[in-house]
Amino acid sequence: MNPTPKPGILDISPYVGGRAHVEGAGKVFKLSSNESALGASPMAVAAFKETAGGLDFYPEGSAKILREAIAEKFGLDADRIVCGNGSDELLTMLAAAYLRPGDEVLFSEHAFLVYKITTLANSAVPVIVPEKNLRVDVDAMLKAVTPKTRIVYLANPNNPTGSYLPFDEVRRLHAGLRPDTLLVIDAAYAEYVRRNDYESGIEMVANFQNVVMTRTFSKIYGLAGLRVGWAYCPAAVADVLNRIRGPFNVSVPSQRAAAAALKDRAHLEAGVAHNEKWRAWLTAEIRKLGFRVDDSVGNFILIHFGKDGTAHDADQFLTSRGIILRGVASYGLPDCLRLTVGPEEANRAVVAALAEFAGRK
Ligand SMILES: *Cc1c(COP(=O)(O)O)cnc(C)c1O
């Protein structure tokens, strides 16, 4: 018999990222992967370039310089930070470390696809909980908890819906979990959120032994191509992750550039201000064209089309204009397209093209 993978692996639909290219169009605006509208900090780019002369040396395996830079910026314990090749790697390592075959993993209906992939990859069982108005429904999540629930993944804010759970709701979710169930709070978009009732997860990790928060340099820091993320963990979880992670899982350029990016506060603030301004503008302008747009706290918005395949037609039309959005059928939202807040020129091009599309219908 030929080699066969572990049970569950052949049930995985491979992750398909946002498209990056279109044929034949002139200028292309890629607004499909929630990348930064302002790009990376020049300080991060300079730090990256400085590493070019030392590529023959292995990195320091624990990403010490980066953990210390994160610890300093956020006031955390560097020993409880674990860095990864993107936060995807950390989400995946947590599953590999804690899931036994048949364990249940809870997440909400329109949650990030990586949770399902990594659950199946570990022969565990995804338990997908319906949302209410495209928001995580804590009561429904708690009802779905069983003695087999091992991990609960919560993207907060969630991609692609753009909604978030206020702190008291996260507390309520956690309060309904057994101490041996791990709550993983994926806060990839935390920097963009400007709400008084939001907390990224740092406080939860400080108070509980079964909560982990993951963060990324791929979004507001504009370093998606480098692949750097980090997790803030209880000491025992950090210890577990450090036993199973690849010994050199974060490259030298990644460590240096990410550490430098953290020091550029002005760039971060410019990213937040740009996002606030243009997310509001896009939301209002696209609503004026007659499309439903949900309120979002992230750097993207979800646009609703009719239940008649219009989302597909709109996607094709926009693509013909060189504008790439993200179809989210794989997230259970076949009538929607997700739009990343881009640079001004891109945002204006999207609204103009959608106006043209609406006029043709
Ligand atoms: C983009 C994104 C991430 C980040 O993944 P990286 O591997 O760090 O690039 C994590 N979670 C969600 C929900 C995201 O949308």
Image: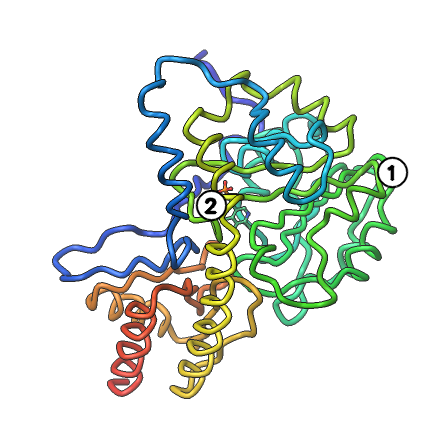
Secondary structure state at the residue bearing disc 1: loop
Residue 228, given in percent of the width and then of the height, sits at 49, 36
User: Which amino acid type is shown beneath numbered disc 2?
Assistant: Ser
Q: Are marks 1 and 2 in contact (CB under 8 Å)?
A: no
Check disc 2 and report the residue beneath it.
218
Q: Earlier in the sequence, mark 1 or mark 2?
A: 1
Q: Residues within 10 Å of mark 1 (few under 14, many from 20)?
A: some
Q: Which residue sits at x=77%, y=41%?
A: 211
**Tag nearer the camera, 1 or 2:** 2
The front one of 342 and 169 is 342
User: Which amino acid type is shown beneath numbered disc 1?
Assistant: Pro
The front one of 177 and 222 is 222
Residue 250, given in percent of the width and then of the height, sits at 49, 26
Residue 197 against residue 47 in the figure, above or below = below
Q: In the image, is the residue at mark 2 within 8 Å of ligand 1 by its beta carbon?
A: yes
**Which quadrant, please, contains the N terminus?**
top left
Residue 137, given in percent of the width and then of the height, sits at 73, 63
Residue 82, given in percent of the width and then of the height, sits at 63, 30
Q: Which residue sits at x=53%, y=18%?
A: 60
Check disc 1 and report the residue beneath it.
179
338 displayed left or right of 95: left
